[in-house]
Amino acid sequence: MDEQKQIILIATPVMTQERYAQLTGLTEGQVRGQIEKGHLAFIKIGRVRMVNIAALSQQALDQEDWQ
């Protein structure tokens, strides 16, 4: 079976935890907790942990039947 990869373009591949909290309606503490427990993808840039929107988008595509 041929497997096709979905290509998605996102304007911002990462965002701050604060901005992610604002957009999702979660508190900043909830976002930090999800990152610490490994439930939310992140990338560390210097000392700052940024939410990895690109990885989250890919996980969503992998979990759903988009065809």
Image (cartoon, rainbow, N blue to C red):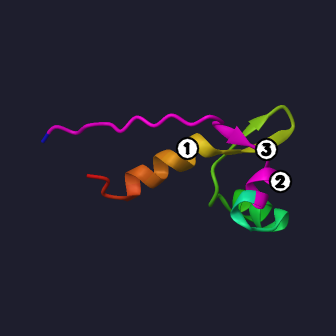
Identify the mark nearer the N-term, 1 or 3.
3
Circle 2 packing at 10 Å, graded few (<14), some (14-19), many (20+), is some
Q: Secondary structure at mark 1?
A: helix
Residue 14 position in % (x across, y down):
69, 39
Circle 3 packing at 10 Å, graded few (<14), some (14-19), many (20+), is some
Q: Is residue 46 left or right of residue 55?
A: right
Q: Is residue 31 above or below residue 2?
A: below
Magenta residue span: 2-22
The N terminus - image quarter: top left
Q: Secondary structure at mark 2?
A: helix
Residue 36 position in % (x across, y down):
74, 59
Closer to us: mark 1 or mark 2?
Answer: 2
**What is the number of the mark on residue 5?**
none
**What is the number of the mark on residue 18?**
2
Q: Amino acid at mark 3?
A: Arg
Q: Residue, x 46% and y 54% (percent of image)?
A: 60
Closer to us: mark 2 or mark 3?
Answer: 2
Q: Residue furthest left?
A: 1
* Disc 1 from disc 2: Cα separation: 18 Å
